[in-house]
Amino acid sequence: MSYELVCGIETHIELATKTKIFCNCTTQFGGEPNTHCCPVCTGQPGALPVLNKKVIEYAVRAGLAVHCDINNNSHMDRKNYVYPDLPKAYQISQFDEPVCVNGYIELDSGKKIRIERIHIEEDAGKLVHEDGYTYVDYNRGGVPLIEIVSMADIATPEEAKEYAEKLQLIMRNVGVSDCKMQEGSMRCDVNVSIHEKGEPWGTRTEIKNINSLSNIVRAMELEIERQEDILDAGEKVIQSTMRYDANSDTVYVLRSKENADDYRYFPEPDILRFYISPEMVEEIREGLPELPDDKLKRYLAMGLPENNARLIYKYRHVTAFFDSAVDQGASPSNVLNMIIGTIYAALQTEEDKENFNIKTTASQLAALVKLVDDKKIRANKAKEVLAQMLESGKDVTEYIKEEDLAGLSDDDLRKICQGAVDANPKAVEDIKAGKDKAINVMFGYVMKNSRGKADVKKAEQIIREIIG
């Protein structure tokens, strides 16, 4: 039987504040267990929370980046549940007045995935399972989160992946989070239901804490298959919380799924309501950087090939480097080729490209590229020089001297071309016999003896004149 998919995603993103949401403990990743915590974030009796203003600013920044409206009046709520990673037995979150509402992310197809809300909340601690025991590390407890809740507009696993990837790119580019899924600073809960076409939506299940883009696709595929088998057997899908295990490539039920009523939300009595002024919202809006999709469109308008432009547009430090070199007069195409052809060879991972810690400056690259643009050196030579510059951090003038930039006279080029003809009699015979590819042998001789300065087209014309 044929079924249609209905999917929405709840994305938890750890904010890049230096301190936690309600206390002064560090948000730094790692550290010995239970060393980044205090009475407030471990819920000790008598310890009172104080809301971190930076968390609100980051939430507004995130919301504006995905076209949300901002609620000027908002407050925190208590979400009640009992679990070992939450020592006070409730989470301070938001329920009926989230900071942001009614946004969207546009996919490459033009389809808009609507965002219902973005609210702020505290993260829970982490359970560590070892040798049959479970340990609790509260370092992560109290780290500020935004939860971005999409509408159920996603129709395929591939759309889910693209939505999550675009969300990740946007949040990184506006600087609210590093969104490192491998470190848990971005986690996706994927809600999945299927139904026959024309019939009401089916019962949904929620796959919790998916930690990679590829796992989103695989977990959804497996859960869709599981639900199809249940419905094909004439049984009913039970609303459940699921877990995807990448090691065994399986999805399995953790527990029956809670509804909002189960959490017994009520306004947080220890934190006052807060007001987000329109002036604050506009100030944050004006400070937003260019968003990734807008940046890609600008690069395509420069005439850059889309496949190549996509290799840089999602890394904010790379694009800042690219834009700076171009602003200093270097051609966009040659700057791009140098980045993806030479610099990327030294940056093996996504994190390397995101951090973009290289010794060469944009000004140094621009100076090198302009030599290529002005045809004073060839692209291959420039790539060799750039590799050396990346190692040393030195300017191009350390590797290319004035005498290297001197042009090649027509007389000198003719002498070299004559030498190529004299040194390759077999190639000459082949060319005379109509085997035009044999002239490539001549080009190798010419480029070597001119130290890469020769104009190949002009050399070809001279060689053919000499051969007659």
Image (cartoon, rainbow, N blue to C red):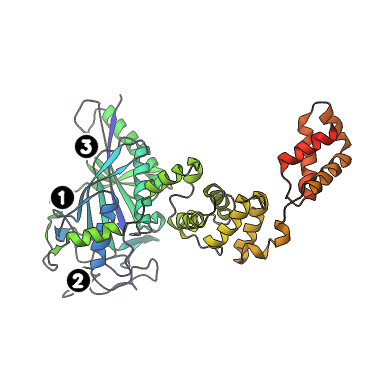
**How far from the left and from the top, in percent, is residue 266?**
10, 58
Q: Residue at x 20, y 73 (%)?
A: 44
Does any portion of residue 123 appear in the rendered image? no
**How far from the left and from the top, in percent, is residue 60?**
24, 57
- Residue 344's disc is none
Q: Residue at x 34, y 63 (%)?
A: 16
Q: Is residue 370 left or right of residue 273?
A: right
**How far from the left and from the top, in percent, is residue 163?**
34, 44
User: CB of mark 3 within 8 Å of CB of mark 1?
Assistant: no
Name the residue at the top extreme.
1
Residue topped by disc 1: 260
Q: Residue at x 76, y 32 (%)?
A: 437
Q: Is residue 209 left or right of residue 304?
A: left
Q: Residue at x 25, y 61 (%)?
A: 283
Q: Is residue 357 left or right of residue 12?
A: right
Does any portion of residue 143 appear in the rendered image? yes
**With respect to residue 156, does 214 lie above or below?**
below
Q: Is residue 129 left or right of residue 232?
A: right
Q: Amino acid at mark 2?
A: Val
Residue topped by disc 3: 203
Disc 1 secondary structure class? helix
Give the mark nearer the N terminus: 1 vs 2: 2
**How far from the left and from the top, in percent, is residue 40?**
22, 72
Between 227 and 40, the one lying in front of the other is 40
Q: Amino acid at mark 1?
A: Ala
Give the CA separation, mark 3 to mark 1.
16 Å
Position of the N terminus, as image quadrant, is top left
Residue topped by disc 2: 50
**With respect to residue 452, does 466 lie above or below?**
above
- Badge nearest the viewer, 1 or 2: 2
Give the mark nearer the N terminus: 3 vs 1: 3
Between 194 and 283, the one lying in front of the other is 283
